[in-house]
Image (cartoon, rainbow, N blue to C red):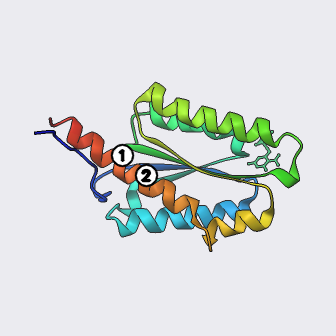
């Protein structure tokens, strides 16, 4: 019989780092709200959440890697917002952030999730920061909870 293992949606007892870009703070503050709300509603303790602020999305992988490698956190949730309309180097910032965040998880073995809005317009970003298209911060927090739970089960098999 095939063994199926999936994570539970409980964050109780786990420590989470949120690494947050200050660029587009108007949006990223909403991602932080969404992530914290999701972590708390799924049993994480407020004291087990640490928020680290970086200047922009480009710096998310750097600080995420330091947080993951510190051993102090079970998961790292990266939050940021890159809007194409604002920058000709959108592709570099967004691309490097996405690649780097994925690499952090692979290099450290610490679940590292992607709560980075990449949009063409401010309106689209607002939609993904707690209005009609959900909240990417909340999604990234859910992903982190599921992965830490799955990892803890895997280590017991
Ligand atoms: N950083 C963002 O997080 N979002 C953006 O939309 C953005 N734009 O438009 O340029 C942005 N740039 C800053 C970048 O992330 C770095 O902080 C900066 O280049 C210093 O390394």
User: What is the residue that sits farthest to the bottom in this orientation?
Assistant: 131
- The quadrant holding residue 132 is bottom right
Query: In the rendered image, is residue 29 in sight?
Result: yes
Q: Position of residue 152 (x, y in %)?
A: 24, 42
Residue 80 locus on image (x, y percent): 66, 52
Horizontally, residue 88 falls left or right of residue 130, namely right
Q: Using the image, tell me which numbered label, if any, was put on residue 143.
A: 2
Residue lying furthest front in this view?
1
Q: Quadrant of the C terminus?
A: top left
Name the residue rendered at 10%, 39% in the picture: 1
What label does residue 101 carry, if any?
A: none
The front one of 18 and 149 is: 149
Helix or strand or loop: what does disc 1 sit on?
A: helix
Left or right: residue 78 compared with residue 110: right
Q: Position of residue 62 (x, y in %)?
A: 62, 33
The residue to which callout 1 is attached is 147
In the rendered view, tell whether residue 9 sits above or below residue 108. below
| In this rendering, position of residue 63 left or right of residue 44 | right
Tell me which residue sits at (33%, 46%) in the image: 148
Residue 26 visible? The answer is no
Q: Are marks 1 and 2 in contact (CB under 8 Å)?
A: yes
Out of 97 and 70, give the one closest to the viewer: 97
Mark 1 neighbour density, 10 Å: few (under 14) some (14–19) many (20 or more): many
In the displayed structure, does residue 82 sit left or right of residue 134? Answer: right
Is 5 drawn above or below residue 61 in the view shown?
Answer: below
Quarter-of-image position of residue 24 = bottom right
Image point 81% across, 60% down: which residue? Answer: 121
Gap in Å between the C-alphas at discs 1 and 2? 6 Å
Q: Quadrant of ligand 1?
A: top right
Q: Position of residue 36 (x, y in %)?
A: 48, 64
Please name the residue shown 32% across and 57% down the image: 11
């Amino acid at each position: 019989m095939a063994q199926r293992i999936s994570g539970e949606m409980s964050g109780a007892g786990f420590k989470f780092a949120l690494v947050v870009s200050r660029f587009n703070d108007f949006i990223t503050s909403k991602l932080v709200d969404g992530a914290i709300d999701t972590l708390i509603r799924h049993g994480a303790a407020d004291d087990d959440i640490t928020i680290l602020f970086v200047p922009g999305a480009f710096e998310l992988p750097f600080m995420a890697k330091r947080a993951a490698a510190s051993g102090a956190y079970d998961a790292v949730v990266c939050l940021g917002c890159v809007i194409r309309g604002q920058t000709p180097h959108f592709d570099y910032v967004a691309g490097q952030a996405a690649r780097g965040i994925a690499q952090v998880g692979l290099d450290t073995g610490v679940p590292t999730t992607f709560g980075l809005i990449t949009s063409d317009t401010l309106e689209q970003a607002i939609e993904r920061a707690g209005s009609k298209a959900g909240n990417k911060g909340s999604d990234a927090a859910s992903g982190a909870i599921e992965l830490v739970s799955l990892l803890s089960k895997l280590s017991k098999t």
